[in-house]
Amino acid sequence: MADLILHPGDRVIMVSGASRGIGAAIARALLSDGYRLSLASRNPDTIDELFGHAPPERLMVTYFDAQELKSAEQWVEGTISRYGRIDGLVNNAGILRNVGFNSGDEKDLNDLWAINVKAPFWLTKLCLPHLRKAGNGRVINIASTDGKRFRHGGSVGYTMSKHALIALTHAARIEGWDDGVRATALCPGAVDTDLLAGIQNTAPVAERLQPDTLAGLVSMVLGLPNTASVAELPVNTRLESYI
Ligand SMILES: NC(=O)c1ccc[n+]([C@@H]2O[C@H](COP(=O)([O-])OP(=O)(O)OC[C@H]3O[C@@H](n4cnc5c(N)ncnc54)[C@H](OP(=O)(O)O)[C@@H]3O)[C@@H](O)[C@H]2O)c1
């Protein structure tokens, strides 16, 4: 099948956690590429403050709490009633809690699982029919190098959640392949955002990735044709074998 031509202005992309950090950088890059965006987090007012200058016909902002299945349903339904289509889903919203064999508790582990894994699962499930219809749907999951290996001193709970998110990415890629859906797990090392505030045992600030660098990669992956599938995209800040 000849590749469909991907015009950003015709495509609607959903980005979770667009209020700050990597998600805000992704939203900024995709807005400048010309996409129509559906942005969400628990703080829609913050997103409005960041992107209120955008052309109104290319911007939708919604309340979304990754811990509530209902709000995932409402976000997807709202996007369809606003734009009539969904071409891409960027599962970016995520949290880091220190859950190890001697730290953290059941609530921390449940929160990691609900926000980092279950919400991307539900959003992917809800979006898949629309992504299939598009013929060139895209799912980009912001995983982590912690989804590729366990790093000494890392959070066991966070690492488990990011491994699961990569598994979800591969499942979506296989499930949607015949209908042109391509899924990518973007796996960054340490990024200079709020997420790492107060976290020990991570790269010093000067050696961290910048959110804009990752936003550029998301923009690049979204623009690839169906014949160029990137299943995983690790981006490391330090020297490690294979990642
Ligand atoms: N920073 C790093 O070093 C790093 C490295 C690898 C991967 N990642 C991943 O990259 C993604 C973005 O992280 P970041 O560094 O940009 O973190 P951040 O600056 O802490 O931002 C996290 C984003 O997720 C949203 N979020 C958190 N809990 C939510 C919930 N319950 N419902 C809806 N949205 C929620 C936040 O929005 P509200 O608070 O407005 O709801 C915020 O927009 C995460 O999945 C993270 O695991 C980060």
Image (cartoon, rainbow, N blue to C red):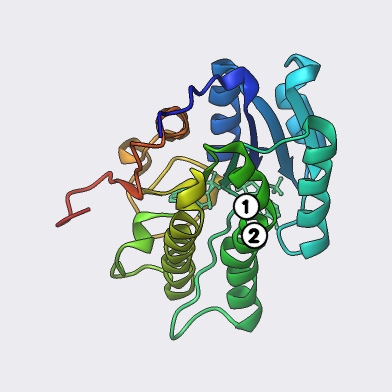
- Compared with 191, 74 (above or below) is below
Label 1: how many residues lie within 10 Å, few (<14), some (14-19) or many (20+)?
Answer: many
Q: In which quarter of the image is the N terminus?
A: top left
Q: Name the residue under label 2.
A: 125
In this view, 148 is above or below 157: above
Residue that appears at 75% across and 25% down: 59
Give the residue drawn at x 60%, y 63%.
121
- Residue hosting label 1: 128
User: Label 1's element?
Assistant: helix
Q: In this view, does 209 lie to the left or right of 99?
A: left
- Please indicate, yes or no, whether residue 201 appears anywhere in the rendered image: no
Tell me how many marks there are: 2
Asked whether, in this view, residue 218 is left or right of residue 36, the answer is left
Q: Position of residue 145 (x, y in %)?
A: 34, 56
Tell me the crowding category of disc 2: few under 14, some 14 to 19, or many 20 or more residues within 10 angstroms, Cα based: few
Mark drawn on residue 203: none
* Residue 223 percent across, percent down from the top left: 45, 27
**Residue sitting at x 38%, y 48%:** 190
- Element at badge 2? helix
Along the line of sight, which residue is nearer the eye, 192 or 163? 163
* Residue 135 can be seen, yes or no: yes
Label 1 CB sits under 8 Å from any ligand 1 atom:
no
Quarter of the view holding residue 225: top left
Image height of 141 relative to 19, above or below: below
Residue type indicated by callout 2:
Lys
> How far apart, in angstroms, are the residues tagged by discs 1 and 2?
5 Å
Task: Residue at the far front: name it.
Answer: 1
Residue 102 percent coordinates (x, y): 45, 85
Q: Tell which of 75 and 161 is nearer to you.
A: 75
Question: Do the residues bearing badges 1 and 2 touch, measured as CB atoms within 8 Å?
Answer: yes
Query: Callout 1, which amino acid?
Result: Leu
